[in-house]
Amino acid sequence: MSLLEVRDLSLSIHGAPILERVALDVAPGRVTGVVGESGSGKSLTALSVMGLLPDGARATGHIGFEGRDLLGLDDAAMCRLRGNRIGMIFQEPMTALNPVQTIGDQVAETLIIHGAATRAEARSAAADTLARVGLPPERFPLSRYPHELSGGQRQRVCIAMAVALRPALLIADEPTTALDVTTQARILDLLARLVRDDGMALMLITHDLAVVAGTADHVAVMQAGQVVEAGATEPLFRRMVHPYTRKLFAASSHVPARAARTRDAPLLEVRGAVRDYTLPKARLFGRRPVFRAVDGVDLTLREGESLGLVGESGCGKSTLTRAILGLEPLQAGEIRLDGAAVTAPRVPAELRARMQVVFQDPYGSFNPRHRVARLVTEPFHLMTDPPRGAARRAAVAEALDAVGLKASDADKYPHEFSGGQRQRIAIARALIIRPRLIILDEAVSALDVSIRAQILDLLADLQARFGLSYLFISHDLSVVRAITDRVLVMQAGAIVEEGPTAQVFDAPAHAYTRELVAAAPRIPDHWTQGDTHDA
């Protein structure tokens, strides 16, 4: 018997159709996965259930929950349900949490608002709930603020807020997209345990088919506001009747065609790199403690090579990246690019021009008030004689064309593009001054699987055309396997394993690497062999 029954749900916003006759069932004690690309209607289906639709929205159909049609309830009635009988976990915990409120107060707030406890009782219940999601008060005091926690820990706080009142239905909207593989595995295990222990229903929204395959009992595939295929998880993956489902699966396992052009000449060399941070004093007197973020790292990246760098959040990847870019000084060791020393903060412009970076969130790295032409030409300040006038416009057009965009896109603003198109603009910006090295920092982590496949193909093509070298930093092991020649595994600031990518992932020698590989979600091979319909 279903706890949540969605029937013929249609939604329009200011007259524009968004959802069309969506049907969905979520049963108690079961996990229902909702998969599809951005814009498919997954999140708006969840927001329709929560009654959190934007102004101008008009929903029709039936959303049955505990014998009531949620579309017929007023806002006061929905407020009594939200956080009480229906909980929701959002994708980005840092924006879902109040940065000036302690984690204890934020979890307790749910109980106080719904009149389930006094303030003192709510604080005690908050401590119990945080302990239940893996944040025991002896290690994570209620007085901590969100910025004092890691991404995975912040997501656990959001889960604690959502389950504090033991809701019957929990909606998780992309709860693990930005997390590394081991943290993702722990969060998914936590959600599965809550479903099992409390008998609640879980609606898990994601674009990652492997996450759904390992977690959900039932799957609904959405495309363009419709559910195009639904069923029990294993039979659905065995058959994949709808072409869109097969497209998603093919994109999730896509490996770009890459030409091996690696030369023996080293382009980037890091030797004995050490980076320490001084922490606040724990006591009034005594020395200030030191945290070693990078601990004696050695690496070599050859010309034309793609080198992967993997590890959990906090392992030192980003600190090492900033040091390579000349943005962080080292306490010991050296970094050389093309034989020249990279010594922060005084790195010559000519040397900086040989390396560029593509960040995880292109929208966050763009000035929203600037047009694409200005954004793409930002690296020109590193050149002694940058092109001007017609030559500048031609350089922009060439860079945009190289990444699959049009010259006319130069006059648009970042908000006029999709996430995948914005990432192409970020790559064009990195490419425009023809660097030798491009550092890709989680450059495809937030993208849908089909867009991710397109960007990986683009990166392989650009590398072949321009002889680029890549340092590819990612927590997604499937992406690293697809795009890199060699891989380094980083733990607690040190490189614990390195070697050819296939060798490291297929036969990991270090226990930590084995833990990473085991934690990575995957679709069982026998689910998709032999039974899939022809396209």
Image: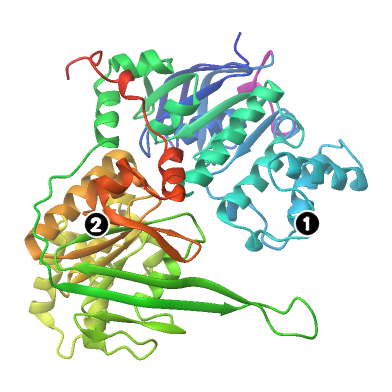
Do we see residue 368 in this rendering?
A: no
At label 1, the amino acid type is Pro
Asked which secondary structure carries label 1, the reply is: loop
* Vertical side of 356 occupied by 441: above or below: above
**Is 320 or 192 nearer to us in this picture?**
320
Q: Which residues are magenta?
A: 67-76
Residue ID at (59%, 16%): 27
x and y percentages locating residue 155 in the rendered image:
60, 47
Residue 99 lies, in percent from the top left, at 66, 61
Instruction: Find residue 132 and name its label.
Output: none
Is 277 or 420 nearer to us in this picture?
A: 277
Residue 11 image offset from top left, x and y in percent: 46, 28
Task: Give the label on residue 424, or none.
Answer: 2
Mark closest to the chain's N terminus, 2 or 1: 1
Locate residue 289 relative to residue 470 in the image: left or right: right
Query: In the rendered image, which quarter is residue 261 located in?
Result: bottom left
Q: CA distance from mark 2 to mark 1?
A: 43 Å
Is residue 75 shown in magenta? yes
The residue that disc 1 covers is 141
Secondary element at image label 2? helix
Is residue 181 rendered magenta in the image?
no
Q: Dot 1 surroundings within 10 Å: few (below 14), some, or many (20 or more)?
A: some
What residue do we see at 25% from left, 87% from top?
Answer: 349
Quarter assignment of residue 413: bottom left
